[in-house]
Structures are given as C-alpha cells and as structure tokens.
Amino acid sequence: MTKEIVLLKLGGSLITDKDTPYTPRLDKLKELAQEIKTVLDSRPELLLILGHGSGSFGHVAAKKYGTRNGLIDPKGLKRPLGSDAEYWKGFAEVRFQAAELNRYVMESFLNAGVPAISFPPSSSMVSKNRKVTHHNIMAIRKSMETHLLPVVYGDVAFDEALGGTILSTEDVFTFLVEQFSPARILLAGMEAGVWEDFPARTRLVKQIQLSDYEKMRAGIGGSASTDVTGGMKAKVEEMLALIQKTKGLTAQIFSAEESGFLERALRGENVGTLLTA
C-alpha cells in the first residue's frame, strides 16, 4: 500500500469568529473533525499532518505587541517597542492564546474519536528570519508511524535574527515539506479559491500552473486580468515556491465552509483552485 502524505491547514477564519476575539466556531470544528475522521477511517494509506491558523485568538495580542516583527530589526538594531520586558510579555501572551485555540481544536478531534497529538512550534522550533532552523522532527515521525494525527499551528518562536517572532502555519509547512516531501498541501479557508474577478467573485480559477502564474504576474496573455491580491497573493506565491522546489507536489486553496467540501478535497477532488508545476 503506497502511503500518501498530505499537509492540511484549517484557516483561522474558518475555525474562529474573526469579528469576535477569542471565539472558536465549535460546531464548525466538530463538523471538520468528523469529515477528517471519515476519510482517515476509509483510507489507512493517507498520512495527514494538520495545521491550523490562530484566527481571532493570536492576532489581537500579536498586533498589540508587534510580536511577528520581532525585537530586532533587519539591521540588527533593537526596535523602538518600549522595553524588552514588554515584548516578551506579549510573546508569552500570544503563545497562551494560540494554545487556547489549539485546545479547542484538539478537543474536537478527541470527541470525534481521532487520536491527535499537538506539537506547538513555540516549544520545539527555533527560526532565523522566520525560516525554521532547529526542530526535533523525530517526534512527529513517530506519531505518524503510530497513526496518531500530528497537529501544528501558528505560534511564537525564538528567532536567531529577530529575537522572537510568530511562525505562521505556512512557515511551519515550508519546513515540513522539506522533511516529509508530501504529495499535496490543502489550504481550507473561507475563500472558494483564486478569483479571476475579485472582489466580484463570479469566475473561479480552477487551476494555476507555475508558468501561467509567471505570465499572469507579468500581465501577459489571456489570464492577465486575474487579480491575486493581498493575503491570497502571498498564499499563492508561497505555495508555488514550494511546488517549484518539491517534485510532484500540488496545492489546493478552497473553502471548507460548505459541508462535505473538506472530505472531497481530502479524497483528491479539486473543489477550489489547484496549483501545480
């Protein structure tokens, strides 16, 4: 039986109420955990690593203390953030809030009968300019061998260049791709995928190839009008960079807001925008 490794991210906007700080969407988490269980039960060859965003939990404190920007700027000078103590107080608060949301996520898996185990980046990863440089990957390998579901998430980390920072789930995934060479990355959020006509949202781009995106960005050819903006642009470019470096890797950006979409994506269907080499 050929094993297939898949990295799945549940976006923060999907699992929390973005407009109300510290509010998990418990019914949604319950539904998503059940969909994941259904697929894992029927496909023992599927090895899943789950990641999730921070949504309305980590972002409030992170913004207040400027945690992601770090204590030290790119020139090696201390940022004018007030005292070091203030920065580290914020660092600890962001870590606490990220762990709070993770607890809700883990509880939903436990209740669904999925044996999951959490690997907080703050306790195991050190980065340099947000690129993971140190991590004991063996524990995640062992959990996969025993068919436990490893769970990572957006979290604070000590950083050799910045002092401290926040590693997004995508930052963590970038490191895990190098370690595990997965076949697929699935990014489940609220947005249906990449739109040709954002913000009107009437024409969904079903597939983006690396070469097409280069043309799209340069403004050449028929698909030049596709508007990949802001957060979505960063997400697409991050995924295409990983695809370029990793043989056979594809990524899919889709909405798991509608019941059953996550299950369909896990089974290999393109329910959003597929990114390929």
Image (cartoon, rainbow, N blue to C red):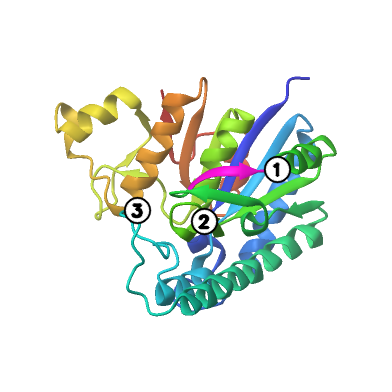
Query: Which residue is drawn at the image coordinates 34% and 44% (left, top)?
Result: 194
Q: Is residue 240 magenta?
A: no
Q: Is residue 170 visible?
A: no
Where 175 falls versus 231 (above or below)? Answer: above
Q: Residues within 10 Å of mark 1 (few under 14, many from 20)?
A: few
Q: Is residue 148 rendered to the left or right of residue 271?
A: right
Q: Which residue is labeled 3 in the image?
A: 231
Residue 50: % across, % down: 64, 47
Gap between marks 3 and 2, in whole Å?
Answer: 12 Å
Q: Residue furthest left?
A: 220
Residue 8: % across, % down: 59, 44
Look at label 1 and name its amino acid: Asn
Q: Which residue is labeled 1 in the image?
A: 136
Residue 228: % across, % down: 27, 45
User: Which circle, 2 or 1, is nearer the viewer?
Assistant: 1
* Numbered circles on residues, count: 3
Q: Secondary structure at mark 2?
A: loop
| First of labels 2, 1 by sequence position | 2
Query: Which residue is drawn at the image coordinates 69% and 47% (left, top)?
Result: 36
Look at label 2 and name its amino acid: Gly
Tell me the magenta residue range. 131-136
